[in-house]
Image (spheres, helix red, strand yellow):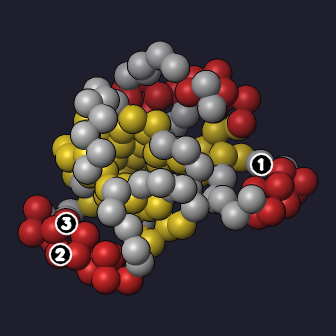
Amino acid sequence: MSFHALKDLVQEFSAVLVESKASDIEIIDGLRHLKSLIDFSEYCIVKNWLIVNLDISEQEAVHFQRHSVIPMFIYAETIVEDSKQRNFQWIRTTLIKEKHSDFVFSTQNTNYFLVGHGYSCSMTIGHAYRYFDF
């Protein structure tokens, strides 16, 4: 996958501004609270993010439900902290397994915390493959 500038994606897909007003202390408290609710050790805190909701057909929705995933993923240009220390410059998650809040999501292996402002948009699966090699 090649890097795509967030500002270009926001413009092309008419993304809507969304803002997480969580402070650093709230993020840390949120991590502790989430850890008490679910067993996880891997997390990634990101800024400059885009929540991508996939436009899918009813047939595709059944497929996603069978695999227990939400037709959604996160793209972020800035990684604030990554518990796995993968040294990525940016990130595109796999499909979301669980949405804990508007700014906290879990994939199969990692919990993502979205901080600062970001965007939300919808796109087709075709666009997701084209832009993100999804």
Mark 3 secondary-structure assignment: helix
- For the point 20% across and 46% down, which residue is it? 81
Residue type pointed to by label 2: Asp
Of residues 68 and 122, the one nearer the viewer is 68
Q: Are marks 2 and 3 in contact (CB under 8 Å)?
A: yes
Q: Residue 27: which numbered mark, if any?
A: 3
- For the point 17% across and 75% down, which residue is it? 29
Left or right: where does residue 55 sit relative to residue 133?
right
Q: Residue 29: which numbered mark, if any?
A: 2
Residue 26 image position (x, y, % from top left): 16, 71
Mark 1 or 3, nearer chain start = 3
Judged by depth in the image, the label closer to the viewer, 2 or 1, is 2
User: Looking at the picture, does residue 20 appear above or below residue 15?
Assistant: below
Q: Are marks 1 and 3 in contact (CB under 8 Å)?
A: no
Mark 2 secondary-structure assignment: helix
How far apart are the alpha carbons under marks 1 and 3? 32 Å
Left or right: where does residue 31 sit relative to residue 65?
left
User: In the rendered image, which residue does mark 1 sit on?
Assistant: 56
Residue 4 can be seen, yes or no: yes
Of residues 55 and 68, the one nearer the viewer is 68
Residue type pointed to by label 1: Ile
Residue type pointed to by label 3: Ile
- For the point 16% across and 68% down, which residue is it? 28
Displayed quadrant of residue 125: top right
How far apart are the alpha carbons under marks 2 and 3? 5 Å
